[in-house]
Image (spheres, rainbow, N blue to C red):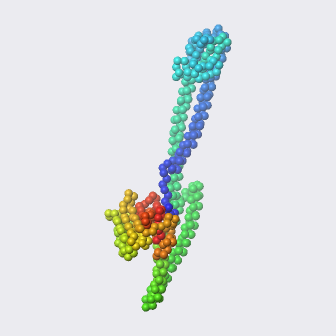
Amino acid sequence: MRPAEAAAPARSLPWRSSGLRWGAGFAAILGGCLLAMFALMYWRSTALLFDTMDRSVLEQLELLAARPPDLLPFMIESRMHHQPRVVTQVGLFDQDGRHIVGDIETIPAGLVLNGRVQAVAAPGDEAVHWRAAGRRLPSTRILVVARGADEILNVRQDLVRGAAIGIVPAILLSLLGGALVGVATERRLRRFNDVAARIIEGQLHERLPVNPKGDELDRLCAIVNRMLGRLEEAIAALKGVGDNIAHDLRTPLTALRARLERAQRLAGGDAELGWAIGKSIDDVQRALSIVTALLRISDIRHIHRQSAFAPLDLGEIVRETAENYEPVAEDKGVRLLASVAAPPVIVVGDRQLLTEALVNLVDNAVKFTPAGGTVELRLERTARGPLVTVSDTGRGIAPAVRGEVFKRFYREDASRSTPGSGLGLSLVAEVMRLHRFAIELSDNNPGCRVEMRCWHDGDGCAMVAGARDGRPA
């Protein structure tokens, strides 16, 4: 489960990029149009060529069939000798199919003598294609007229080659053009995503980029920017009210605590009055702790103290925290163990804030671990970066409320009798967000395990809040 303030946009997979989809879409549309145009041209051209050839064959067949039977052999013979360049071939056969005259010496196999043009193979050479027509003459002789169709087949092949030469570059150009348009759009959207991620992280002064050309996206961005301006004003006003209340409360509460402490000293031997004043001091101190925590969270969230970032040894922070909290754990009967990877374990961050976050986690673990339990603080190196874990053997948390632990003032019903403000994990979450680190709560079986992943996860802080377990501070 990821809190909204910490979610970061994931990079899209290459095959899901809009550039590739735009290019593929353009290529598909243009390729489809060109293929349809080529198919129509191919069909019309070959149909016209075949129709012209068929008419030529039929005209020759009818012309020769109309000649006198006794003159027909001489006309065919004369045609062969005096018109050698005529592409139409003719053959005259007797009623039994024996050759009489002409350059067609055998009736083509499969030719039906019905006076219609048919596609047949040349006698003796099936690789040669003819368009042929034959009929029986009144004299019972058989007349066959044919013309080679290979020239049309060659034209068809030329058309296919020409189409390939024209269509393939056109599709590649459309793919490139679509990809360029898509990449430009994706870069623009990536800028929007980057700004949106910074806004999610709390930088409400950021605005979406608006180009002067004023297209649909620019108009949408302008509307969103106006909305962000109003939102920033409202949040600033609300923050100002909250901060002012906290500031105004801190001074009288501090003065009230001082007066109560003085009254406790003046109470002398009155045990009952001293006890009542002591309880009042505890309540005032708790109120002051809440006010201080609220102001601290506000400072971390809105001031953005990254100017204090510097390389630091995370191992030193872990060891110091363990040493400082060991007496507290012993007083409660809890064993505190610490394991630190070989130094140095260097990260870039704010030493004070990281120490404060780790102290909150260890305090939380010790507070909710019963006597005889164990709290373990561990720092180790992983392939991605340093990993700090705080695990305990306490009661853990119910799965139904694991996503609530980083909310301010959230406290589980079972923990309300335990001292605390419900702001500790909220402060930890703000520190992690500022450092763009990740924090995850899981089940320790028994107890709770908290992981501080001290590396940048993607484009921003990847807060995995209570994915399996968690606990309020």
Query: Considering depth in this image, is 3 or 469 the residue closer to the camera?
Result: 469
Q: Is residue 333 visible?
A: yes
Number of marks: 0
Q: Position of residue 316 (x, y in %)?
A: 35, 68
Residue found at x 36% / y 68%: 337
Extreme top residue here? 70
Query: Considering depth in this image, is 3 or 264 the residue closer to the camera?
Result: 264
Residue found at x 66% / y 10%: 139
Q: In the displayed structure, does residue 113 sit left or right of residue 249?
A: right
Residue found at x 52% / y 63%: 4
Extreme left residue here? 342
Q: Is residue 269 above or below residue 97?
A: below
Q: Position of residue 318 (x, y in %)?
A: 36, 68
Q: In the displayed structure, does residue 229 sit left or right of residue 381?
A: right
Q: Is residue 180 visible?
A: no
Q: Position of residue 308 (x, y in %)?
A: 41, 68
Q: Is residue 389 above or below residue 420?
A: above
Residue found at x 32% / y 63%: 342
Query: Considering depth in this image, is 229 or 116 the residue closer to the camera?
Result: 116
Using the rendered view, name the quadrant where residue 136 is placed: top right
Q: Position of residue 260 (x, y in %)?
A: 46, 86
Q: Is residue 222 above or below residue 324?
A: above
Extreme front residue here? 372
